[in-house]
Image (cartoon, helix red, strand yellow):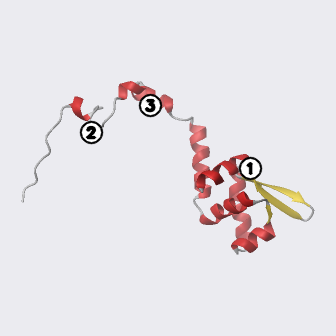
Amino acid sequence: MTMKKPAVKSEKETGCRIGTMVAMPCDLNAVGGVKGLRGRLPKLKKITETSAIHNALSDPVRLTLLYLLAIQPLCVCVIRDCIGIADSKLSYHLTGLKKVDLIEGEQLGNWIVYRLTNKGKKFAHESV
């Protein structure tokens, strides 16, 4: 059985062609070419920060922590009872969320109460 080759369309019909790249349905000139595309990208700092946040939230335990703290601020003992992990693991995951500024802790007597930062609230609501 032989395969029938698709009809070859002109570049105008298929879109644009850059160097040896395959045709794509776009008008690259409409965005200012490759330079225009590059200009629309966020700064590297923003990309790096967003990547770190997504990396932190890629762990189910940290995502669970984010959802718990979206309900209300909580102390470590309540968080531990809710998700059932050892103190050392909980500390590790809380630190990961603090590093990317999604949560913050406040010392109240003998306890630390954790709450979402404004950035944490944004990601908690976007993740639902």
Q: In which quadrant of the rendered image does the C terminus lie?
A: bottom right
Q: Can you say whether 22 is above or below 32 in the image?
A: below
SS state under label 1:
loop
Q: Can you say whether 54 is above or below 60 in the image?
A: above
Residue 81, image x, y percentages? 75, 74
Q: In the rendered image, which residue does mark 1 sit on?
A: 117
Q: In the rendered image, which residue does mark 3 sit on?
A: 37
- Tell me whether circle 3 and circle 2 mark residues in contact (CB < 8 Å): no
What residue is drawn where x is 55% and y is 35%?
42
Q: In the rendered image, which residue does mark 2 sit on?
A: 22
Residue 56, image x, y percentages? 62, 56
Q: Is residue 18 left or right of residue 116?
A: left
Residue placed most toward the observer, 87 or 66: 66
What residue is drawn where x is 90% and y is 60%?
108
Mark-to-mark CA distance, 2 and 1:
45 Å
Q: Is residue 63 left or right of residue 104?
A: left
What residue is drawn where x is 72% and y is 74%?
86
Image quadrant assignment for residue 82: bottom right
Please, what is the three-letter code of the amino acid marked with disc 2? Val
Near mark 3 (Cα within 10 A), the count class, few <14, some 14-19 or many ≥20, is few
